[in-house]
Amino acid sequence: MPSFDIVSKTDLTEVDNAVAGVMREVAQRFDFKGSKCSVERSDDKLTIMADDDLKLKQMHELLRGYFSRRKLDAGALDFKPVEKASGNMVRQEVVVKQGIDRDLAKTIIKAIKDSKQKVQAAVQGDELRVTGKKLDDLQAVIALVRGLKIEMPLQYLNFRD
């Protein structure tokens, strides 16, 4: 029976490469001379340290730019509220989203069922498995899910006959 998986994964080695590129550019740019701006990654969290809000906004732009250069979706970044740090600096946590949470899985399954396609969708951990009898039905489901306005990057893997 044909099936495929809907997943949301971000390659953490590419995230490391993007962070390294941001740090190289911060070290070389004139407007960052003498500043203590930095980006560090631990597990699936990034910590941005900046001198003020203006530099923080510039770090956001750099991070999004380097994510797109590394062919990563900037929609995988979840920016948390800005915190005050020592020495008049600001700190911000950025979570790199991994996996599909339950609420998003429920909305995707509901949209698939409302479309009256002859497929079944099941949650398996942090991914969705969609099975059906015809490949055309599965391709229609992929088109349907792409048409939904979901801000999280999704991949369609393991397309099998």
Image (cartoon, helix red, strand yellow):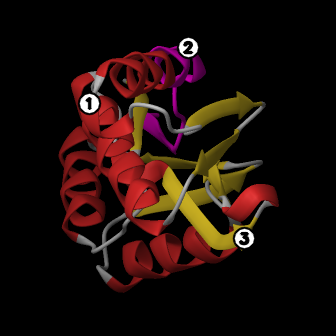
Amino acid type, mark 3: Glu
Residue 33 spot, x, y in % from top left: 39, 31
Residue at 39% x, 52% y is 60
Disc 1 target residue: 30
N-terminal of the pair, mark 1 or mark 3, is 1
- Callout 1: SS: helix
**C-alpha gap between disc 1 and disc 3:** 26 Å
Query: Which residue is more in the foreground, 76 or 4?
Result: 76
Disc 2 target residue: 13
- Callout 3: SS: strand
Disc 3 target residue: 83
N-terminal of the pair, mark 2 or mark 1, is 2
**Residue 19 is inside the magenta segment:** no
Residue 76 spot, x, y in % from top left: 47, 50
Region in magenta = 1-17
**C-alpha gap between disc 2 and disc 3:** 27 Å
Residue at 38% x, 64% y is 54
* Res. 139 mark: none
Task: Identify the image quadrant of the C terminus.
Answer: top left
Up the image or down, 88 lies above or below 159; here it is below
Up the image or down, 71 lies above or below 143; here it is above
Amino acid type, mark 2: Thr
Amino acid type, mark 1: Phe
Residue 116 spot, x, y in % from top left: 31, 79
Number of the front mark, 1 or 3 = 1
**C-alpha gap between disc 2 and disc 1:** 28 Å
Residue at 26% x, 30% y is 30
Residue at 18% x, 46% y is 136
Disc 2 + disc 1, Cβ < 8 Å = no
Residue 119 spot, x, y in % from top left: 42, 59
Q: Residues within 10 Å of mark 1 (few under 14, many from 20)?
A: few
- Callout 2: SS: helix
